[in-house]
Image (cartoon, helix red, strand yellow):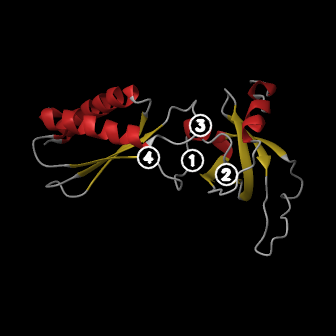
Amino acid sequence: MSDLDGQMAHTALREAATRILAVHDLVLEDIVVKGPRSMPEVRLIVDLPEDQLGSADLDAVATASRELSDVVDADDTLLGPDPVVLEITTPGVDRELTAPRHFRRSRGRLLTLTIDDVPYRARLLAVTAADVLLLRQEPGRDDRGRPRRRPDGTPERLEIPVADVTSARVEVEFDPPADIAQLIADADPTALKES
């Protein structure tokens, strides 16, 4: 398969996957192709739409996977006639948050972020239309159980443009606060002046 044929198949696969996933209220985040040409591995990373909280329903992911597999088997223009390993998966907790949609999906979650070489641990409350993160700092506790302090000179609430974030990941939280829904509801993304 030439590079041009591969690009067209990639586009066709993206369109077919997007159509099937939409029926199950899932969106296509990325397509990753790796492995040898003789038996490539094609991984489709899927998630919920950015306006939804929570995790993708694994039964819905499994059903979408079966349906897409049937479509790929029936249409050689999508991945070619040769055997291919097709996998549909969710991003996982270790995904680096890079795009505004990743942050929107993480509302209410505890994040570890780096901004201008300064590390933060904060709960994401909202993302404005101008892609500004509304955060509440939650420094946590050290290894001895003592409360950590916020970085000097920083308020409890932060407003940080997504573009200023050097790195960000969701922190696994076994005991999230009971008032997360209220925190999100109270966050007012329109409070920032749009420029």
In the rendered image, the vertical position of residue 17 relative to residue 172, given as above or below: above
Q: Distance between the residues labelled 3 and 1?
A: 15 Å
Of labels 2 and 4, the one closer to you: 4
From the image, tell me which residue sits under label 2.
111
Q: Can residue 152 be seen in this view?
A: yes
Q: How far apart are marks 2 and 1 (CA)?
A: 9 Å
Tell which residue pokes out farthest to the bottom in this image: 144
Of labels 3 and 1, the one closer to you: 3
Of labels 1 and 4, the one closer to you: 4
User: Which one is earlier in the sequence, the residue at label 3 or at label 1?
Assistant: 3
Badge number at residue 97: 1
Query: Which residue is more in the foreground, 35 or 27?
Result: 27
Of labels 2 and 3, the one closer to you: 3
User: Which one is earlier in the sequence, the residue at label 1 or at label 4?
Assistant: 4
At 18% from the left and 40% from the top, the residue drawn is: 79
Badge number at residue 53: 3
User: Which one is earlier in the sequence, the residue at label 2 or at label 3?
Assistant: 3
Badge number at residue 90: 4
At 26% from the left and 39% from the top, the residue drawn is: 66
Q: Give neighbour class at mark 3: few <14, some 14-19, many 20+ (Cα, 10 Å).
A: some
User: Which one is earlier in the sequence, the residue at label 3 or at label 4?
Assistant: 3
Q: Do the residues labelled 3 and 1 touch (CB within 8 Å)?
A: no
Q: Do the residues labelled 2 and 4 touch (CB within 8 Å)?
A: no
